[in-house]
Image (tube, rainbow, N blue to C red):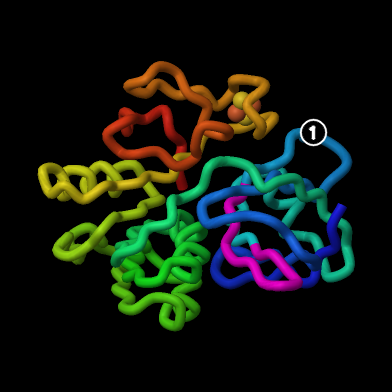
Amino acid sequence: MAVVRSNVRIASDVYILEAEGHFAGEMGQFYMLRGWDDYPLLSRPISIHDKTEDGIRFLYRVAGYGTEKLSRLKAGDPVGLEGPFGNGFPQIEGRVALVGGGMGTAPLYYAAKRLASADAYLGFSAEAFGVEPFREAAQAVTVNVGGYIVDDFRPDGYAAVFTCGPLPMMRALAAKLDGSGIPLYVSLEKRMACGVGACLVCSCATKSGNRKVCADGPVFRAEEVELNDDFNIH
Ligand code: FES
């Protein structure tokens, strides 16, 4: 069990929970969070949003019983934290574009901090959130509210693109990068139970057979996976 340092609402139904302590984890990895003792028994997979010397932050949307329970935690409350899990994003030497939609922007902030050079493209359907910290961590920040962030994205000059967000956005991005030779890394989300590759709940079809999003992902090269509606992302 870790201890909650703060749990702040930053937009409608969107919160940032910070736990105290020194935690391991790289960009794109996730933790299983649990802020309750009763039903449901399963923890919730939530990606690392930020990490400092003495704390770790998770940006999450209240979307059901589990996250509603999380949102009620207060400073000093215990919170179950297991992790880090998953493979995370690769370290890239050159300039990287981070393209996120809605809650998919959550793992990209820590990536912006960890990469030597990154531009952020952040799309929101109605209400932007969590944008200001990107302005320090990234070289350039483009925000689109109510439109299509992929329309604002020009692929020129990037060594790689990392994305997380709604499937239509990631599909449009993959189409835009097609033939460019720029590698696209997608962070996928599926319902999870164990988080460590034991239960197969999060299986997905890839070109190299069935893989587990929790243990083999959540980050895949876009051309490896079918970006189909199996993924219930944000
Ligand atoms: Fe159990 Fe992925 S959540 S195998």
Placement of 168 over or under 202, stated as above or below: below
Placement of 35 over or under 214, stated as above or below: below
Residue tagged 1? 41
Residue 126: which quarter of the image?
bottom left
The count of marks equals: 1
Q: Residue furthest top?
A: 209
Question: Picture coordinates of residue 63 (x, y %)?
Answer: 59, 48
Question: Picture coordinates of residue 141 (x, y %)?
Answer: 33, 76
Q: Horizontal placement of 195 versus 234: left or right?
A: right
Q: Is residue 53 magenta?
A: yes
Q: Residue at x 16, y 47 (%)?
A: 181
Residue 153: which quarter of the image?
bottom left
Q: Residue furthest left?
A: 179
Placement of 96 over or under 53, stated as above or below: above
Q: Horizontal placement of 122 versus 156: left or right?
A: right
> What's the residue type where badge 1 is placed?
Leu
Question: Picture coordinates of residue 107 (x, y %)?
Answer: 50, 57
Q: Residue at x 88, y 42 (%)?
A: 37
Assign a secondary structure to mark 1. loop
Q: Is residue 189 magenta?
A: no
Query: Does the magenta stretch mainly form a helix, a strand or a loop?
Result: strand
Mark 1 vs ligand 1: CB under 8 Å? no
Split into quadrants, the picture shows ligand 1 in the one at top right
Q: Residue at x 80, y 67 (%)?
A: 20
Q: Residue at x 79, y 33 (%)?
A: 41
Between 183 and 10, the residue placed more toward the observer is: 183
Between 167 and 224, the residue placed more toward the observer is: 224
The residue segment tinted magenta is 46-57
